[in-house]
Image (cartoon, rainbow, N blue to C red):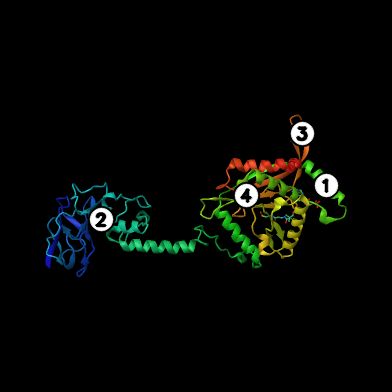
Amino acid sequence: MSLIELKIPDVGTDTEVEVIEVLIQIGDVVELEQTLLVLETDKASIELPATAAGKIENIKVKVGDKVSEGVIVATLLSQTNTEPTPDIPAAVEPEEQIEIPAEPNPEVKPAVEIAPEIILEPSNSGSVVHASPGVRYFARELGVNIAQITLGSGRKGRIIKDDVKAFIKSELTKKSSETNSGTGIPAIPAVDFSKFGEIKSEPLNKIKRLTGKNLTCNWLNMPMVTQHEEADITEMEVFRKSYNAEQGANKELKITPLVFIIKALLAAMKDYPQFNSSLAADGNNLIYKQYFNIGIAVDTPNGLVVPVIKNADQKSLLELNNSMRVLSEKARKGKLMPTDMQGGCLTISSLGGIGGTAFTPIVNAPEVAILGVTRASMKPIWNGSEFIPKLMLPLDLTYDHRVIDGADGVRFVVAIAKYLADIRRLLL
Ligand code: CAO
């Protein structure tokens, strides 16, 4: 055991330097190179490392003292009889430019490894941040950008470790009060509507709450693009109406445009198999489905549900019509089983019976696209020499842009429109 005097080394200045932080107390056990003091010159902050390991017996300086080379700052009781390491350079934190101590001893690690890399970080207000390398290191380890701490509680506004801790604490508190659902997105502020007039509050039913959750999840997780197109269904409607007229009063046998749209969608999915796929959960693989199940969004008194027509590609127009009728009736009576709503490959959301000219449906993930349909209307279409009245059906295809490129998106919806424009193609 030996008593070692820890002294101010040559810190590269002839004038006295000021002690601005004392980081040890009597009785502390310090390690070799541990920062003991922070000194400040006109141009730089200097961390003074311990030149030996041991227990601090005495401290001879205090904050505000002016010291110069050779001044004893502390005495230390070393466990070994070795002499103090003479060459550990003080870690210099320059305030105007980075200075690496001249010719550092290659055998000896700098007191704080990151000291030479330290760049002065301007604070939010544009002024220079005052913090020792040790504190900067501490902040970095915890992922804190020290420039965000506007004022330190150390001398002359210096940032100390406690400031970093307080900053983290306040950020965490702020985050939990500013965000909801863990998305990092600010919550919509609560408003007391009764301040503005009479109100009535009703709880959302289970379907609405579930749909809302799923739609939010899909909206936030998927980069979606909606492509619009119009299909000329003039001839298709002539056929459909004459077919329905043949059925007389038998409503069950009547068909709506939707069955043709399902058929056209299936044909396009066979042409473009990427539309019958799902991204694997890890986002690295595309799973191509070899079956064709089509989800149909159904508007019910309790909210939106999506029953699935299984193996739709194996069904005739009339069979599709029947499946749709059965499923939508079940949906409206609230009698769908979970299995009725599982296994969809693509979904159709048809608002054509209600109206609308276009909309941007949200993909029913993990499907990669959804086809929206609104009301067909007569339009003058230029045939090269004259305008011809045509019944045009608006189609709105929303797709997952991680899986579907824009060009394929438009090819797909154009293919659907082509099949609808000439339904004989569906037989090919
Ligand atoms: N253009 C013009 N007329 C249309 C049409 C269109 N695109 N689509 C349907 N029609 C007509 C039908 O032909 C029918 O008229 P007729 O009896 O004279 O033939 C009438 O509108 C009513 O059709 P419908 O809506 O009852 O039947 P459908 O097969 O077209 O749709 C269903 C069935 C279950 C999809 C529909 O009833 C429904 O619930 N749609 C709402 C879906 C929804 O809410 N989507 C929003 C989800 S958010 O993305």
Residue 274, position in %: x, y?
60, 46
Left or right of 302 in this view: 70: left
Q: Amino acid at mark 3?
A: Phe
Residue at which label 3 appears: 387
- Disc number for residue 276: 4
Q: Earlier in the sequence, mark 4 or mark 1?
A: 1
Q: Earlier in the sequence, mark 2 or mark 4?
A: 2
Disc 4 and disc 1: Cα gap in Å? 31 Å
Residue 399, position in %: x, y?
61, 48
Residue 85, position in %: x, y?
15, 57
Residue at which label 1 appears: 241
Task: State if disc 2 and disc 3 touch (CB < 8 Å).
Answer: no
Disc 2 and disc 4: Cα gap in Å? 57 Å
Give the crowd class for mark 1: few <14, some 14-19, many >=20 residues within 10 Å.
Answer: some
Decide if residue 11 is in sight here.
yes
- Disc number for residue 112: 2
What residue do we see at 67% from left, 41% from top? 414
Disc 4 and disc 3: Cα gap in Å? 37 Å
What residue do we see at 68% from left, 64% from top? 337
Left or right of 89 in this view: 248: right
Disc 3 and disc 2: Cα gap in Å? 80 Å
Q: Earlier in the sequence, mark 2 or mark 1?
A: 2
Decide if residue 132 is in sight here.
no
Assign a secondary structure to mark 3: strand
Q: Earlier in the sequence, mark 3 or mark 1?
A: 1
Which of pointers 4 and 1 indicates the residue nearer the eye? 4
Which of pointers 4 and 3 indicates the residue nearer the eye? 4
Nearer to me, 162 or 368? 368
Give the crowd class for mark 4: few <14, some 14-19, many >=20 residues within 10 Å.
Answer: many
Residue 391, position in %: x, y?
77, 42
* Image quadrant where one finds the C terminus: top right
Task: State if disc 1 and disc 3 touch (CB < 8 Å).
Answer: no
